[in-house]
Image: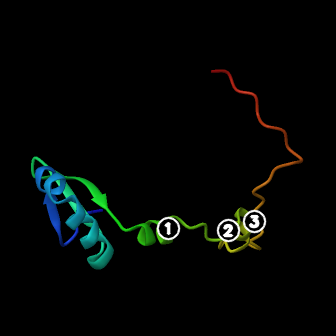
Amino acid sequence: MNMITKQSWSVASAKARFSELIEKAESEGPQTVTRNGRPAAVLVSIEEWERKTARKGTLTEFFQNSPLHDSGIDLVRLDHPPRKIDL
């Protein structure tokens, strides 16, 4: 996945204009910082970070919404102990 955003900053430019970099991340979205011409980091606003990292339900809800739910596939093998293998 290509993470280069529309606004790109060299490390030197990002250091020199850090306040502006933060303002751009808040107003325009993620900002890419490059090192030697290659993407090295992306700065995002705290609102963007919290939105991207927010928990979206419980593990139980995840499994209940799975396409395998109610498929009849036995994912839990409680009646069969694990096989012994030699490593």
Q: Nearer the viewer, residue 11 or 22?
A: 22
Residue 13 drawn at (x, y percent)? 12, 56
Image quadrant where one finds the C terminus: top right
Point out which mark residue 30 bears. none
For marks 1 and 2 on the same chain, the one whose residue lies earlier in the sequence: 1
How crowded pointer 3 is (Cα within 10 Å; few <14, some 14-19, many 20+) is rated as few
How crowded pointer 2 is (Cα within 10 Å; few <14, some 14-19, many 20+) is rated as few
Which residue shows up at 24% across the image and 72% down it?
Answer: 24
Q: Which residue occupies the extreme bottom position in the image?
A: 27
Residue 59 drawn at (x, y percent)? 70, 62
The three-letter amino acid code for the residue at tag 1 is: Glu
Which residue shows up at 24% across the image and 63% down it?
Answer: 19
The three-letter amino acid code for the residue at tag 3 is: Thr
Q: Nearer the viewer, residue 62 or 15?
A: 15
Distance from the alpha carbon under mark 1 to that under mark 2: 20 Å
Q: What residue sits right under mark 2 in the picture?
A: 62
Which residue shows up at 30% across the image and 62% down it?
Answer: 1
**Residue 17 picture quarter:** bottom left
For marks 3 and 1 on the same chain, the one whose residue lies earlier in the sequence: 1
**Residue 14 picture quarter:** bottom left
Mark nearer the viewer, 3 or 1: 1
SS class, disc 1? helix
Point out which mark residue 50 bears. 1
Distance from the alpha carbon under mark 2 to that under mark 3: 5 Å
Which residue shows up at 60% across the image and 66% down it?
Answer: 55
Q: What residue sits right under mark 3 in the picture?
A: 60
The three-letter amino acid code for the residue at tag 2 is: Phe
Q: How is the image coloured?
A: rainbow
